[in-house]
């Protein structure tokens, strides 16, 4: 099973993502960017195949978190999807500039959009 790291501070949204994806992927959830950085620390032995990241997070937003990850050669290649309710004009450029490969708007009402984005990025392949 491919590993997905979900970073989302809203428990309802976490539950929703688990409901959609738990049967298909090995999902691990973090409640904010600090917890995510801990999970991804070199000594953790953990490297997800894909990052699913909320943008509005307490303390360190998703853009800042991803920018940090992209500066780490060990983590830079992990495909990342922004989960965002900020799908305003200009935001897409901001997400892509931070290194996100795709974004999915919240609320997630149709899980096929999320699944398609995940499968598309996973199939680009990091060689397993
Ligand atoms: Mn949030």
Image (spheres, rainbow, N blue to C red):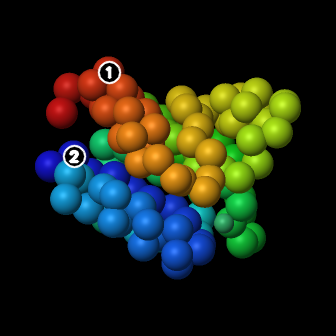
For ligand 1, the image quadrant comes to: bottom right
Taking the image as drawn, is residue 26 in sight?
no
x then y, percent, for residue 30: 47, 70
Residue drawn at point x = 61 percent, y = 32 percent? 99
* Snapshot quadrant of residue 16: bottom left
Identify the image quadrant of the C terminus.
top left
Residue bearing the label numbered 1:
124
Please, which residue is most extreme toward the top here?
124
The image shows residue 2, relative to residue 76, as above or below, that is below
Circle on res. 10: none
* Snapshot quadrant of residue 43: bottom left
Q: Would residue 124 be found to the left or right of residue 100 on screen?
A: left
Residue drawn at point x = 44 percent, y = 43 percent? 114
Please, which residue is most extreme toward the bottom here?
11
x then y, percent, for residue 116: 38, 33
Residue bearing the label numbered 2:
2
x then y, percent, for residue 50: 38, 43
| Relative depth, front residue between 99 and 27 | 27
Label 1: state its secondary structure: helix
């Amino acid at each position: 099973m491919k590993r997905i790291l979900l970073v989302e501070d809203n428990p309802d949204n976490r539950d929703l993502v688990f409901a959609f994806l738990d049967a298909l992927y090995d999902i691990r959830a973090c409640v904010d960017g600090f917890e995510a950085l801990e999970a991804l620390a070199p000594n953790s032995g953990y490297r997800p195949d894909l990052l699913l990241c909320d943008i509005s997070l307490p303390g360190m937003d998703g853009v800042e978190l991803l920018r940090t990850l992209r500066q780490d050669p060990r983590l830079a290649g992990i495909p990342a999807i922004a989960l965002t309710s900020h799908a305003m004009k200009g935001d897409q450029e901001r997400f892509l500039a931070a290194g996100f490969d795709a974004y999915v708007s919240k609320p997630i009402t149709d899980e096929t959009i999320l699944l398609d984005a995940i499968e598309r990025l996973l199939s680009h392949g990091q060689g397993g």
